[in-house]
Amino acid sequence: MTDRFPVAILGASGYVGAELLRLALGHPRLEIAALGAKRQAGVLPETLFPRLSGLDLPPFVDVDEFDGSGCALVFCCLPHSTTQETAARLVPAVRVVDTSADFRLRDLASYAEWYGTPHLAPELQRDAVYGLTEHARAALGSASRVACPGCYPTSALLPLLPLLSAGLIELEPIVIDSKSGVSGAGRALREDLLFAEVSEGIRAYGLGGHRHTPEIEQELSGVAGSDIKVTFVPHLVPMNRGILTTIYVNPRAGVAATDLQACLEAAYAAEAFVQVLPAGVVPATREVRGSNQAHLGVADGRGGQAVLICALDNLLKGAAGQAMQNANVMLGLPEDIGLMAGTLAP
Amino acid sequence: MTDRFPVAILGASGYVGAELLRLALGHPRLEIAALGAKRQAGVLPETLFPRLSGLDLPPFVDVDEFDGSGCALVFCCLPHSTTQETAARLVPAVRVVDTSADFRLRDLASYAEWYGTPHLAPELQRDAVYGLTEHARAALGSASRVACPGCYPTSALLPLLPLLSAGLIELEPIVIDSKSGVSGAGRALREDLLFAEVSEGIRAYGLGGHRHTPEIEQELSGVAGSDIKVTFVPHLVPMNRGILTTIYVNPRAGVAATDLQACLEAAYAAEAFVQVLPAGVVPATREVRGSNQAHLGVADGRGGQAVLICALDNLLKGAAGQAMQNANVMLGLPEDIGLMAGTLAP
Amino acid sequence: MTDRFPVAILGASGYVGAELLRLALGHPRLEIAALGAKRQAGVLPETLFPRLSGLDLPPFVDVDEFDGSGCALVFCCLPHSTTQETAARLVPAVRVVDTSADFRLRDLASYAEWYGTPHLAPELQRDAVYGLTEHARAALGSASRVACPGCYPTSALLPLLPLLSAGLIELEPIVIDSKSGVSGAGRALREDLLFAEVSEGIRAYGLGGHRHTPEIEQELSGVAGSDIKVTFVPHLVPMNRGILTTIYVNPRAGVAATDLQACLEAAYAAEAFVQVLPAGVVPATREVRGSNQAHLGVADGRGGQAVLICALDNLLKGAAGQAMQNANVMLGLPEDIGLMAGTLAP
Amino acid sequence: MTDRFPVAILGASGYVGAELLRLALGHPRLEIAALGAKRQAGVLPETLFPRLSGLDLPPFVDVDEFDGSGCALVFCCLPHSTTQETAARLVPAVRVVDTSADFRLRDLASYAEWYGTPHLAPELQRDAVYGLTEHARAALGSASRVACPGCYPTSALLPLLPLLSAGLIELEPIVIDSKSGVSGAGRALREDLLFAEVSEGIRAYGLGGHRHTPEIEQELSGVAGSDIKVTFVPHLVPMNRGILTTIYVNPRAGVAATDLQACLEAAYAAEAFVQVLPAGVVPATREVRGSNQAHLGVADGRGGQAVLICALDNLLKGAAGQAMQNANVMLGLPEDIGLMAGTLAP
């Protein structure tokens, strides 16, 4: 066991935390030092999840009494607006990979505006890295604190960043129409997430402005060098996992869909977790369920737009998988270790 | 029974035809004169559909031997490219309500291009009415032949036509992102429609150009008075029924989302089957499943676009329900007769 | 309107109450006098259910302040253990159709044992009729208070009662394996009813003894003339509506499955809402979704058992539909009025 | 690569074969020597399954031209009644793990009766091992040919074999009520497997006698030492993966459910892939989806029966997972190698 890094997972009773636990259990270089939960402190994980029977995991510890001592790295999978205080409580040596929104927005005023509460740890925000792994790798090695992108932003930024960076598309309009499975909303007890409210139907939501919008705009504006506004509409689909994001952009004059395809292929040629599908093959969430892959596709629209499509598993490349990918880089491990499970289909 | 119009339903073993049969059985002014099918000729309907047990329906007749004698009206729910010949075989007196694409495109060349086969009944096309009921009512009363719009076009045209007609939105870009339940593909034996291929996933399709595109462009161009091209991307959602269409348009200078809302409210104030939901209420397919209603909503996008949303049941307002609505108008009956069943939820 | 009976629906914001509202709105001889709810008092129904837009329904009244004055009949669709007090509050003239368990068990001690609380209106229990319509018709005409059977008991009793009554099957073992859609659990905010907990899985529950057990045993014992115990195991299926109950019984010596089939066919030959399917046709919930029909089937098991199968829509024949059927009989109306909507498929 | 056994997978385009491919790709001691398919011969696997992009797999070879040369072991995942001929064509040295029914029944007459065709390789049947791993381990080490149990039989035999072996339950009645996800039917193009026919419904099937019955009876009779007949009714559930089998048995006089629980706990205490859940915890398919685990539970029924429940993933412990478990034993590898992936939830 001496060659394993001790890690903790806080919020291990939620969907993202439990997914990280699953990944950590199959990871040859990590060991579980602690599992933290709030309401479930003291409970054995297998009581909550019979699937963990026989694994002899320790009982959940109280997140509010956890300081990270003895851990090389802590995965924080807590609800938004609770992680800033938790992170501030950890001993300085421990490194943090956070899947909440608490450290994603560099602009503290923007955070306060979108999340309705002032930022509680501005000094910790300062050196937080926005961890879209493929575009943040250089900063990850020495990062103390990594904010993993939201599931929707991951699906929007992977296709858009290289194209904006290469100047192939207009800065507006950028229309992002996303469709997500229900696990993206977490395990909250909300009437609109009951099976009988979700099944056999689809609906848009967040039309007044979904909280993933400022993240997307922050990162796009960063590479474009100017202030970008996007129209982003998420939809809830009756499935457990998966995000399919369809993006409508205007290619610059003289740029064809094949140029966009070539740009994305070049950008991601060496990546283990981003596949640009051949022209004519359309990304589908079923092809990435249970894997850390993002599938990208490009097509022409008749009305002058190009269509970009990204499919990923919201709990993996959109959350726990990307968190583990970041942790691997931070710990100096091969980036794909513990993450190569294939798609579970059907 | 003398106050009932005798009608036939051709293609009654398919999803749309069977839905029309259900509607006709509950309609107080229609009686079933004949049910036509191709492969199932001679079979009793209750053999195919145990739910029809005890209704004493006649066996399916062979579509190819049916001429419509004795019928006031024939509902044709046959596959695309087979209805032109069938319609040509009917006695002249019988009126036709068709749910296929065979009589939807006024431009015969466009039909040939999109459907890959020349039009077989050009003379019948000439006086066919495109039956989006709310916008075609005047022509329906005396129509011999009504081509019901496709499910996707219905969901796109209901919100777009009044706005274009009023000059409130730019003619481009018009981006139509549609999400449909699986029954929209009919009962075809296709591997990609198997439960285990569809469930727990979402995918885009028809990126090279879905056949509903020319219909949408034909009708939009008609009211706009100029040639309109749209970017239309349909998606397959793991549910049986329902279409949710999210449309991204650019309001003209000085036009706000509230103006679009007001325009739609005025356009459909007197309509029984189109509800413009109050600002802030977002259409969802679960609210229209099993009913002939279309729900419309309007919202602002951050990137300068306005967002229009339409929800409807693809088998009802998107197919059989609208067909019955058209038939009611054609026969001089109240438009809502036999169509007032409420939404089935959950 | 003078030919319409004024009715109230209490608990109209729940699944069963909302289903009764849908039925009542399509019923030619009823008018809505009041809609009662607890948490939603004062709210307009269309605020909760956009599908009710444009119907001009009155706001929900507070159930606790409702006494039924002016109503011919009140449908009570309130949670278990709250209806006894509500019913006691109503003016004596009003008749009650209750879909809760509060008046189903004739033995007050059994009620207290299974529901963990003493019966609060024993005098009202005395003349309550257990309303499995096909087997209770004689008593319904003059009943003041009708307790509609639970969804599971309806599916078990319809096939079992005639066979026990005719002495064709042994009194034990009787094994009842039921599979239900999720709406049967109501709209309660329970983590185990969230989409992401239910979808893509099946589980048994209530193994310690589901509360529908004593109802089933009460009615079976009644016709058998001796104390019957059953093994009843319900399962939760990832679908909104539907119950499929598979029952394993031992035919008495010399009795074949064809005899059981003949007995059921004779028992239900004149019934509008029970169809005994031909031998070899297996009941399926999809064939009864959205209708008030129960489908019955019989088959031979290899191990000496006979297999009885019943499919019904838990919200209709299993709850609101049967409630309306009972109300029709109580009010002297044709039993099938307002209940003839066909199966919604797919 | 010298420490990897070369294996082939025949029928790799079907659900079970593709699942074995996924397992083999993550297995540290196997290498893919060949992938066989019938209709897809010559096609690249990633053309059929975009999820395999970037893995550089060889094109499918024609099953009919494959003789297994150079392979240590061949996984046959071909349709029933085609494997006997395929197996006879292989070079003698190659060992076979078969997931079809072709070598499961020791009695050739029974095979002919249930499958409607004579056995084509009786001499190969003679030394075939019925590979329910936990009960066949001794014979697997030297086996040339292992017939993996069907998914239903696995779920029935795991709880029943130890109880019959210990004489704790009566030999009849044994009622087996199984509920399966749709992938169990394979990828066949059948109308009744279309999404719109399966979703939102449940149905029984195979009432005339499902082909998994003789397997179950063969193995139960084997341990009981007398001829056992079971009543087995499978049901189709709208989910991709998972089998939940509920079994109703009569404990012998003086035997309580706790005795059955203790017997199962003892029988499987050392097993990696069978978990007997604590009393009161009910198996659910969601807890085993994506893993090779079988979860067992025991409860009392009121009517004198005991209730046994087994949950497993039909494509893993019910097919490909058990096949790999058998292969590991045959090759002298640790039994759990390549099979320890945790449950994917939700």
Image (spheres, coloured by chain):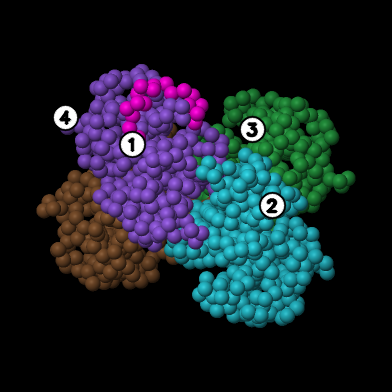
Chain colours: A purple, B cyan, C green, D brown
Q: Residue at x 62, y 39 (%)?
A: B280
List the residue tagged with mark 2.
B274
Mark 1 → mark 4, Cα distance in angstroms: 28 Å
Does the stretch in magenta take in A125? yes
Q: Amino acid at mark 4?
A: Thr
Task: Answer yes or no: is residue D139 visible.
Answer: no
Q: Circle 1 sits in a helix, a strand or a loop, which is it? A: loop
Pinpoint residue B224: horizontal percent, then vertical percent. 64, 60
Badge 2 and badge 1 in a common chain: no
Q: Residue at x 29, y 53 (%)?
A: A266
Q: Is residue B336 left or right of residue B288?
A: right
Pinpoint residue A126: horizontal percent, then vertical percent. 35, 26
Q: Circle 2 sits in a helix, a strand or a loop, which is it? A: strand
Q: Circle 4 sits in a helix, a strand or a loop, which is it? A: loop
Q: Chain of mark 2?
A: B
Label of residue A131 in the image: 1
List the residue tagged with mark 3.
C79
Badge 1 and badge 3 in a common chain: no
Label of residue A2 in the image: 4
Q: Chain of mark 3?
A: C
Circle 1 or circle 4, nearest the eye: 1
- Crowding at dot 2, Cα within 10 Å, few <14 / some 14-19 / many 20+, comes out as many
- Crowding at dot 1, Cα within 10 Å, few <14 / some 14-19 / many 20+, comes out as many
Q: On screen, C308 above or below B66?
A: above
Q: Residue at x 68, y 49 (%)?
A: B264
Task: Answer yes or no: is residue A321 visible.
Answer: yes
Q: Chain of mark 1?
A: A
Q: Circle 3 sits in a helix, a strand or a loop, which is it? A: loop
Circle 2 or circle 1, nearest the eye: 1
